[in-house]
Amino acid sequence: MQIDTVHLGLRLLDPLPGFQAHAKLAPFPSRLKELPAPDHKVASVLLLLMQKNGKTVFPLIQRNLGSEKDPHKGQIALPGGRRELTDPNLAFTALRETQEEIGIPAQEITIVGSLSPLYIPVSKNMVHPYVGWTSADSIFKTQPEEIHEVFLCGIDQLLAPDIFQARIINTSYAKELSVPGLLLGDRWVWGATGMILSELRELLTDQNG
C-alpha cells in the first residue's frame, strides 16, 4: 500500500483521534489524563514514511538492552529524543534525532504534519510525534550507543485487522502486567510507540474506509 502524503498532511490539520486511539494501547488508560510532572522534559519522535518495493514503510528502532539508566531499554521505538536548548523547534528536534540515530539526513526529510502529543509518566517525557516523508534510500547508519537495531515496518502491516495482541510482561513499575500491543510481523510493539502508531492507524483507516 502507498500513502498519499498530501492527503495525510491535510488530514493532520483537522482534529485528531489522540485520546481514543491512545487508550486502545495504553497500559494504564486512566493515566492518559495525568498532568506532566513539574520537572518533565520535552521530546520529539519521527514517524518517517518512505517507499520500498512500491509500498510505504517506516523505520522502527530497538533501543539498546544494556543502558541501565534508560527505563525504555530494549523496547521498540520511533527515532527521536529530548529537545536540546539549541533546537529552534520540536520538528527540528525530531529531524536532528532521526539523523543522529538512524542516519537519514535531515535535509532529505519533509515534515508532513504532527500527531497528538503524549505524556509518558515513567520517563517524564512529553513526546511530540511528527510524520515525515523521504525519498532517500533506506540505508541506515545507526548510533550504536543508543540503537540495537533498525528495521522497516509496512503500512500494510499496521492496517492488518489482526495485529492487536495483549501480553503479560514485567516492567520497571509493575510485575505480571497485561499490556495491549501491536504485533507487526514478528515484532511486538507496546507503550508510547504503540499508542502513537494506533493514532496513525485510525487516521489511515478513516482515509481508506
Image: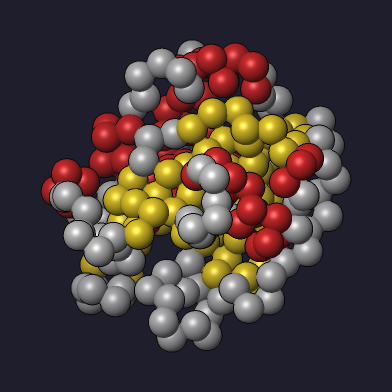
At which x and y percent is residue 94? 57, 48
Relative depth, front residue between 110 and 147: 110
Residue 198 falls in image quadrant: top left
Horizontal side of 91 relative to 169 (left or right) equals: right
Point 64% across, 17% down: residue: 6
Q: Residue at left 34%, top 27%? A: 17
Q: Name the residue at 63% across, 47% down.
A: 95
> Does any portion of residue 178 appear in the rendered image?
no
Q: Please give left or right for residue 7 compared with residue 209 in the image.
A: right
Task: Tell me how the rendering is colored.
Answer: secondary structure
Left or right placement of residue 72 versus residue 22 in this view: right
> At which x and y percent is residue 173?
23, 73
Depth order, front residue of 183/23: 23
Q: Position of residue 190 (x, y in %)?
A: 40, 56
The percent coordinates of residue 62 (x first, y second) are: 58, 66
Q: Residue at x 41, y 82 (%)?
A: 69
Residue 127 vs residue 168, the one in the foreground: 127
> Count the marks: how many?
0
Instruction: Give the quarter of the figure containing the N terminus.
Output: top right
39 vs 182: above or below: below
Q: Is residue 2 visible?
A: yes
